[in-house]
Amino acid sequence: MHNPLIPEILTLLHDHPDGISEYDLIQALEGHAAFEGMEREQSLSLFQIHFLVMNALYTLQQQLWEEEQLYLEVSPVKSHLSRATQQAGSGAALLADGSNLSAYYRDWSHLEGITEAEVEQLLDSFWNRFVVEDLRGPALVTLGLETDCSRQQVTQRYRQLAATHHPDKGGNPEQFIEIRQAYEVLIA
């Protein structure tokens, strides 16, 4: 399937050499025939609009690299074009960095037939992961672990601290609860 937003998005990318956000792309494309019948108040329509924009960006990313050796950095915050020589590393490696997202958004089956309930489930999943990531830093500090620790190291450190701070062993109940909550965040 061909994405009808590609020509306009390519023009917008060229018109904004410092980059353009997904929000600004959507605003600039207001009234495009591809968005006909989509109400912005509904999660399903918002997902469809988002998907069309991201599909166009990831399709352009691949095409521009293959045809012109231009690298398109894709991000909801700011997408922008640059010459391959302006990037550290090869363009192929840069494209591979976002390959999971690219594969998702370039697969039309993720858009076709999606329901409002499935979009709500995707949003819930995103926010749950976001909250866990937000809590991860303090949890690592609580357990005294490094960012790159393994699941096994988390469990081992939790057991060490639990053995010392468990209320049944004379430890502080509040401190033990904090340790247990940190452990739950890190193994989730």
Image (cartoon, helix red, strand yellow):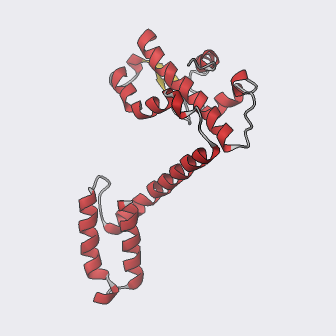
Above-or-below relation of 28 to 101: above
Residue 24 relative to residue 111: left or right:
right
Q: Position of residue 44 (x, y in %)?
A: 65, 40
Residue 38 appearing in the image: yes
Q: Residue furthest front?
A: 113
Above-or-below relation of 134 to 122: below
In front of the other: 42 or 117:
117
Residue 74 appearing in the image: no
Residue 127 relative to residue 100: left or right:
right
Above-or-below relation of 175 to 74: below
In front of the other: 128 or 153:
128
Q: Position of residue 88 (x, y in %)?
A: 35, 25
Above-or-below relation of 147 to 161: above
* Quarter of the rendering containing residue 17: top right
At horizontal 37% and vertical 79% (from top left) the residue drawn is 176
At horizontal 29% and vertical 52% (from top left) the residue drawn is 148
In front of the other: 11 or 122:
122
State the quadrant of the C terminus.
Answer: bottom left
